[in-house]
Structure formats: structure tokens, C-alpha cells
Image (cartoon, rainbow, N blue to C red):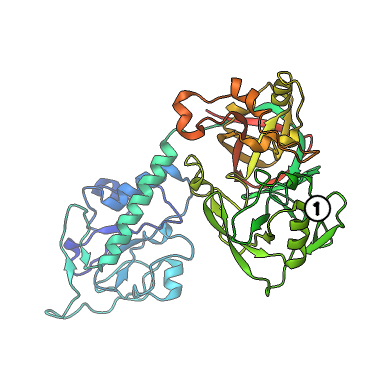
Amino acid sequence: MCRCPRAAEQHWTPHLLPSTPPSSHLFPSSPSQAKRMNLTHSCIPTQPTLPVALLSLNARISDRKHHPPLLCRAGRSAVCFPRCAAPFLAPGVGARRGSGLSGRARREGRCEGRCEGRCEGPGPAAPPTAAPGAQRGPVAMSGPWGAVGPARPAWLWGAAALLALGALLGAWRWAGPRRRRRLQRVGTVLRLFVYPVKSCRGVSVRRAQVTPMGLRSGELRDRFWLVIREDGHMVTARQEPRLVLVSANCDNGHLILEAGDMERISVPVKLPEKNPVRNCRVFGQDIQGRDCGDEVAQWITTFLNSEPCRLVHFESFMAPRKSKDSIALFRNTDEVAYPDCSPVLIISEASMDDLNARLEKKVKIQNFRPNILVTDCSAFEEDTWEDILIGDVEMKGTVCCGRCILTTVNPDTGVIDRKEPLETLKSYRLCDPSEKHIYKTSPLFGKYFAVDRTGTIQVGDPVYKMIWE
């Protein structure tokens, strides 16, 4: 039996080890239970203390078999172990540093006789008790939580409160209903497109990486280059329709531009640091871009036969635009470089067929500039997709794509019509009146998706709708 001074004031208090949750049955809550467990300490509390309650809670969320030490606090730093305490110690854990025990004693869970009383645990004989009247550390009085011991700094109580909160949250999460994911196949990837320069011709690829900021194929990044005026405002096919005739590709570390009778021109993907970083404006939002030089600027200006233009490139150190600043339904984590607002745009082949069946002059998928064209689904079914899985990529549907006059630019001639297919779309693809604050008078065609998990997709991949149950 441990005969520490003031034993009547002490309790065995289990010290919670957050990384090794124990089972609550290891700790007695009454003298009779202590006797059955062969505990010889005379100060077993008759009410379970808060740590015991937390251990019971943690026992529900873990079945690991490590056991924390039982500590008897007989002074500010002295700790003694009864002979029954060693089996309760996690290997290599024991008492904390500063407890008065050596490292070996902490690992083996035995007493070295450094407590202020005498202990039957293994180890040398205990030293004589402190003389009467000797100074002792301040002692916290008994309270509703059970244990009495040396006063502890406020940060320890704060840490204990955080542990309690973590345990409660963990138990709530464990005990709460678990959602199960079910996959329902809804289509197949038919084509993939990357548009290196905003409003210029896209590149059809067989395979692409899906990054948080859009599709990537080698050095081709989706809308990472932008044509601007000298004052920094963006230039798109809405203002300069002939931009859709400019082909862009990457080869051997260079962006290659070609258009009509113009001689092809190349620009390094990795630009010299001496090139200035320009401040740009894209749909009223500020964003930066590194200037690609005078030669390509003159090339673009000559082809467009317009006022002076510059070409800029978005680099990794630059701050992207927040999709939420364009459409409030996006999340704070959704970001883009120079796309309108979303990393990924998906359209179905059936939706294209439905539209062309209503038009006198058929249009191409290039009029709508999607990243992913999906087949094997019904017309406008993509509007209903919320969470989808393609390959190992998870995406979240956000909003439908409201269409503008860019869709009326002929991708083969660079001539803007300003009427079709926009007028036909307005006849049957306007939004619900409750959503007019989002889309206004724009007809809907295609759906924007944000990226939840990055990965690789390729033509022929099945498209799954993720249903949570």
C-alpha cells in the first residue's frame, strides 16, 4: 500500500495520452472495483473523474490496447508508482519528464523511491518523508473533477479543455451518421480541350492533368496566356473576333503561335525575369502577367489590325483570381488565372445535337469552348450533375454557363454574327425566374465545375455521378 504524505488528499488520476486512447475498464471507479483489479492505493475516488469520463468516450472511437500510466501526485514534481501501475504503462511512455523519475524508470513504469512517501512498487527503498513543516508546492483543493494535486499553470488547463473538446468532437463524428458514396455512370469522355491563349483556338488532346486551376497537357496550361491592351485591359474575341483564328501550341519549351498568312512565332514558356510584370484587368478583377516581349506584341497587333496589344503569361508566384468574385456560388478555394470564372467547363454531345436540330445553320463545339465534351448521356443532363468522378479526378458542379455573343463568332472565319446560336438558345434555355439574379438574361449551355481532387483524365474515361447516401 502506498503511504504518501497527505494520502487522504490524493487520488490516482489517469493521464490521458491523446495518441494512444485506452479502454475505460482499466481504471477503477470504486474501492470494490479497485480490489478486483488488485490496486492497493487507499485513495480510489468514489466518483469517476473527468479524465475517466473522457477515457470512456475515447474508448468508443478506438480499440487500441496501449495503457497510460496511473500517477500519484505527492508534490510538485515527485511521482510514485504502486506495483500495480507498471502494466498500465504504454511501452516507452511512463511518467512525463520532470516527474522525478529517470528515463529508464519512465520507460519501465517503476518507482525509484523518489516520492515523498513509501511505495511498494519495484525500485529502491523510498527516502524518508519530508520533515514536518517543510515547504511544499501549492496544492489545488478537491473540486467537482475529483483529483487534488499541485497547482498547474493556466495553459495546462487550457490544453486539457482542448483535449476534452477534441475528444467530444471525435466521438460525435464517429457516432454520427456516416455518408456512403455510390457511383452511377452517366456518360463517357468524348473529347478534351486546352485553350492556352484566352479566346484563341483550342488544342484537342487525348489525355490531360486536371489541376485546381484547370486542365494541363505538358507545357500547355488552360488560359495561362492573355492578350491585353497597353493599359492592361483584356482583349477577347468579343472585341477582336479574329483571335479565334490564332492557333497556339507548345513545343520544346516554347509557345508557338500561327495564324493565316502570318509567319509563325515562338515565345519562351519560361520568360526572362527582366521582362516586366504587368497589372491586368479581367472582368473587372486585378491580376498580373509577365510581358512576353515586343516581337509577339507586334505580331498580334498586325494580325488583328487593331490598336496596340501585348501578350502576357501567368506565372506560379502570381496571385490567381477568386472564382467567387465573379459568381458568389463558387467557394473561397476555387481559383483561376485568365478563364472567365471556372477551372472546368463541361458540355454533352446530346446538348449540341439538340441545339443544332433547332438551327438552320449548324454550329460547332468550338463555338462554346468547353474543356470536356461528354457523350452517352441525354441532352442537358450535365445541368443536374453535382459531384462527378472521371478517372481519379473528383469535381463539383457549381453553376450553369450563361452564354454571351462570343458564341456567335464563327470559329472558321473569325466573323461575329451577334445573333445565332444565341437567339435560339434564348428561346428555350433561359433560367428559372428565381435564378435571374445569377444569370440575368443569358441562356444556359454547359456547366462549370470546380476541382475537388486532382488527377488525370483521358478520352474514353467513364463519367460517374457520385451519390451520397
Number of marks in picture:
1
Q: Quadrant of residue 386?
A: top right
Position of residue 35 measured from the top left corner of the image (x, y, whole percent)? 29, 50
Residue sitting farthest toward the left:
133
Question: Tag 1: residue type?
Answer: Asn
> Could you say which is closer to the camera, residue 372 or residue 7?
372
Position of residue 439 measured from the top left corner of the image (x, y, whole percent)? 51, 33
- Answer above or below: position of 302 versus 367: below
- Answer above or below: position of 282 versus 423: below
Q: From the viewer's perspective, tell me whether residue 347 is left or right of residue 92.
A: right
Q: Is residue 25 visible?
A: no
> Could you say which is closer to the camera, residue 378 or residue 303?
303
Position of residue 303 measured from the top left corner of the image (x, y, whole percent)? 78, 53
Residue shown at the point (66%, 31%) measured from the top left: 464
Which residue has dot 1 on it?
249
Q: From the viewer's perspective, tell me whether residue 239 is left or right of residue 169.
A: right
Dot 1 alpha-carbon crowd within 10 angstroms: few under 14, some 14 to 19, many 20 or more: some
Residue shown at the point (29%, 46%) measured from the top left: 33
Residue shown at the point (67%, 60%) measured from the top left: 312
Q: Is residue 189 visible?
A: yes
Position of residue 390 measured from the top left corner of the image (x, y, whole percent)? 69, 37
> Could you say which is closer to the camera, residue 83 or residue 251?
251
Q: Quadrant of residue 299?
A: bottom right
Q: Quadrant of the N terminus?
A: bottom left
Q: Secondary structure at mark 1?
A: strand
> Could you say which is closer to the camera, residue 391 or residue 57?
391
Residue shown at the point (66%, 33%) measured from the top left: 418
